């Protein structure tokens, strides 16, 4: 494309402002020739402010046409009023300079911009003010992937003066997983709903896990299947792996993990023999008990979870001292009992939430969580919403559900591609009790899910709360306002100097979008979706 074509219908000479006079590795400086153009703005669109920075210019060079951004604008006149008074009678030693950062290049013969790379401007190259349409052409060249893909309807506008609508292809946002970061109240959930709205309303698939219930009325029942755990949805305890139980009850060390496992096996044995009591071991013959426990097969998975605290107490047994009486019966062990006390208390506390017990009741009259997910992954345009807020806010339960769902969807062979949205993923970060990483299933999904068509969309307040492996898999970030140095440091590698300076200054709903799928960072303002969302901060 020639420079003439870029000013479609206009005389490009009208936009000429000056020539490049200095070229550096990281920037260029141009001297303004056409001061009358710089001072008289009446001819231009009001979005154009030539006396300041962040304007765009086009530079005609031998390599092609560069798109540059003005980041410094300086006049050397002693008396600044001469410029504003429109006095164009310039004295020879007075001049105005602009510093230009080259962002993109349209090589000769091409019709799209690409990254400028190592290409630089040359001295005496001519500089023209860019029009909004040239900038929009640049925006249209920003996306690398999904050439034949239909973009999502616009969910935001650009923050620069062109105020163009942001309409991105789903693969730009999601194909290397998306993470939204920002301080509390910065607008992460609002942004999430604005994007999910476009995903769901264009019949793309989404699986939404909502730990606070704030999206419960955002979508209609026709658009999405809604599940509320412990209210209309249950799961069979037998489907939960031992590791997931440990996560759920946040076991503090391996001995608590072991006793939890023993107690569950004992209850599985009781279910197998058709009894609903606990298994009393004190005074019983050791060999006999071990034989019975060993008979629990891999199909005998169900048990009565409400008996778990009591059963853990009953597991506080040990072998007696060997003496000449050949007494091989279990005796009560106070030491073990004390060690298990905190675990028992934790489980008892969880069970005070009646929804918790209902969730694990495997009630056949309710939805079965895993069956619904199984159906969801196979249907081409279905979406699913899971409200986990009813089960309480503990990290254990949330982490366990994420792990359960992640490993379950990963085990499926045929998956219709979907966006897996988890709000406030920092809730499922490392446990307070152990230093184990709490993202086993999620990390697996981040690593392998893309090949199956499972794309993560996570939001978090602090990127440090997610495991470095998971964070390393994220290719696209929506960055809201961040205030703390260590949070900014965590996203530093995704941003350039300009963006880093602005992270603290973003208003509610303003976002820096940075992605491996984009040519350049985007500064956007997300348009709040009209759908219902329960996130208003009450006033005192
Ligand atoms: N783009 C926007 N336009 C208008 N209002 C917005 C926008 N983004 C956020 N807000 C307002 O800001 C408030 C907080 O937004 P939101 O709940 O999305 O923040 P958050 O980052 O998710 O906070 P938290 O971390 O506490 O969940 C809401 O009242 C919301 O209406
Ligand atoms: Mg939120």
Image (cartoon, rainbow, N blue to C red):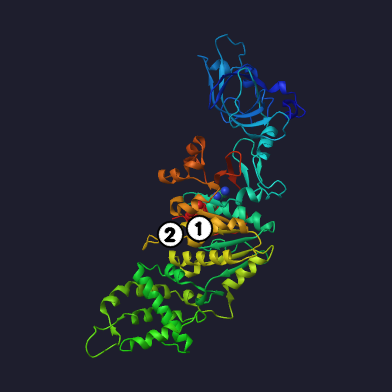
**CB of residue at label 2: within 8 Å of ligand 1?**
no
The residue at the point 51 percent across, 46 percent down is 480
Dot 2 or dot 1, earlier in sequence: 2
Q: Which of 332 and 153 is in front in this view?
A: 332
Q: Residue furthest front?
A: 324
Q: Is 157 displayed left or right of 239 in the figure? A: right
Q: Nearer the viewer, residue 200 or 45?
A: 200
Q: Which of the labelled discs sits on residue 135, or is there none?
A: none
The residue that label 2 is drawn on is 437
The residue at the point 36 percent across, 78 percent down is 312
Cα distance, mark 2 to mark 1? 10 Å
The residue that label 1 is drawn on is 443
Q: How crowded is mark 1: few (under 14 residues within 10 Å), some or many (20 or more)?
A: many
- Vertical placement of 355 versus 126: above or below? below
SS for tag 1?
A: helix
The N terminus lies in which quarter of the figure? top right
SS for tag 2?
A: loop
Q: Where does residue 426 sit, x and y in percent of width and height?
A: 46, 57
Q: Is 162 displayed left or right of 77 in the figure? A: right
- Vertical placement of 290 versus 11: above or below? below
Residue 187 visible in this rendered orientation of the protein: no
In the rendered image, which quarter is residue 432 located in?
A: bottom left
Q: Where does residue 110 sit, x and y in percent of width and height?
A: 72, 32
- Total tally of numbered discs in the picture: 2
Is disc 2 in contact with disc 1, using a CB cutoff of under 8 Å? yes
The residue at the point 61 percent across, 44 percent down is 517
Q: Residues within 10 Å of mark 2 (few under 14, many from 20)?
A: few
Q: Where does residue 521 sit, x and y in percent of width and height?
A: 57, 40
Q: Where does residue 487 sit, x and y in percent of width and height?
A: 43, 46
Q: Which residue lies furthest to the bottom in this view?
A: 325
């Amino acid at each position: 494309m020639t420079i003439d074509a870029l000013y479609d219908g206009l005389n490009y000479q009208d936009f000429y402002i000056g020539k490049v006079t200095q070229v550096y590795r990281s920037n260029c400086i141009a001297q303004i020739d056409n001061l009358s153009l710089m001072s008289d703005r009446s001819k231009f669109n009001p979005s154009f402010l030539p006396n300041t920075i962040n304007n765009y210019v086009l530079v005609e060079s031998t390599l092609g046409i560069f798109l540059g951004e003005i980041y410094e604008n300086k006049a050397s006149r002693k008396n600044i009023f001469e410029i504003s008074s429109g006095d164009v009678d310039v004295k020879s030693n007075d001049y105005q300079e602009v510093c230009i950062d080259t962002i993109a290049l349209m090589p000769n013969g091409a019709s799209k911009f690409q990254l400028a790379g190592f290409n630089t401007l040359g001295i005496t190259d001519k500089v023209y003010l860019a029009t909004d349409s040239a900038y929009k052409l640049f925006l249209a060249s920003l996306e690398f992937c999904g050439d034949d893909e239909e973009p999502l309807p616009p969910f935001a506008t650009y923050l620069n003066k062109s105020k163009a609508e942001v309409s991105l292809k789903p693969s730009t946002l999601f194909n290397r997983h998306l993470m939204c970061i920002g301080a509390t109240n910065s607008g992460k959930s609002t942004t999430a709903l604005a994007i999910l709205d476009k995903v769901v309303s264009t019949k793309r698939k989404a699986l939404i896990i909502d730990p606070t219930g704030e999206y419960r009325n955002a979508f209609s029942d026709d658009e999405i299947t809604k599940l509320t755990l412990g209210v209309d949805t249950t799961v069979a305890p037998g489907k939960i792996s031992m590791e997931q139980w440990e996560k759920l009850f946040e076991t503090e060390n391996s001995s608590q993990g072991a006793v939890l496992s023993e107690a569950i096996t004992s209850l599985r044995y009781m279910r197998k023999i058709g009894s609903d009591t606990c298994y009393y071991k004190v005074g019983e013959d050791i060999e006999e008990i071990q034989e019975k426990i060993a008979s629990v097969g891999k199909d005998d998975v169900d048990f009565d979870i409400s008996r778990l605290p009591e059963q853990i107490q009953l597991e506080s047994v040990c072998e007696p001292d060997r003496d000449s009486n050949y007494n091989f019966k279990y005796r009560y062990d106070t030491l073990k009992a004390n060690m298990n006390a905190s675990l028992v208390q934790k489980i008892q506390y969880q069970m005070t939430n009646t929804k918790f017990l209902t969730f694990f009741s495997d009630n056949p009259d309710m939805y079965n969580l895993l069956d619904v997910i199984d159906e969801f992954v196979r249907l081409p345009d279905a979406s699913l919403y899971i409200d986990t807020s009813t089960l309480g806010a503990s990290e254990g339960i949330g982490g366990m559900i994420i792990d359960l769902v992640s490993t379950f969807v990963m085990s499926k062979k045929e998956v219709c591609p979907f966006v897996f949205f988890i709000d406030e993923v920092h809730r499922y970060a490392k446990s307070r009790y152990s230093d184990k990483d709490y993202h086993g299933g999620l990390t697996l999904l981040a690593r392998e899910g893309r090949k199956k068509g499972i794309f993560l969309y996570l939001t978090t307040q602090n990127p440090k709360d997610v495991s470095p492996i998971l964070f390393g898999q994220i290719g696209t970030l929506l960055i809201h306002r961040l205030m703390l140095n260590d949070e900014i440091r965590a996203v530093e590698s995704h941003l350039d100097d300009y963006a880093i300076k602005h992270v603290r200054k973003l208003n509610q709903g303003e976002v820096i979008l940075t992605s491996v799928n984009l040519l350049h960072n985007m500064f956007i303002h997300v348009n709040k979706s009209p759908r219902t969302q329960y996130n208003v901060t009450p006033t005192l």
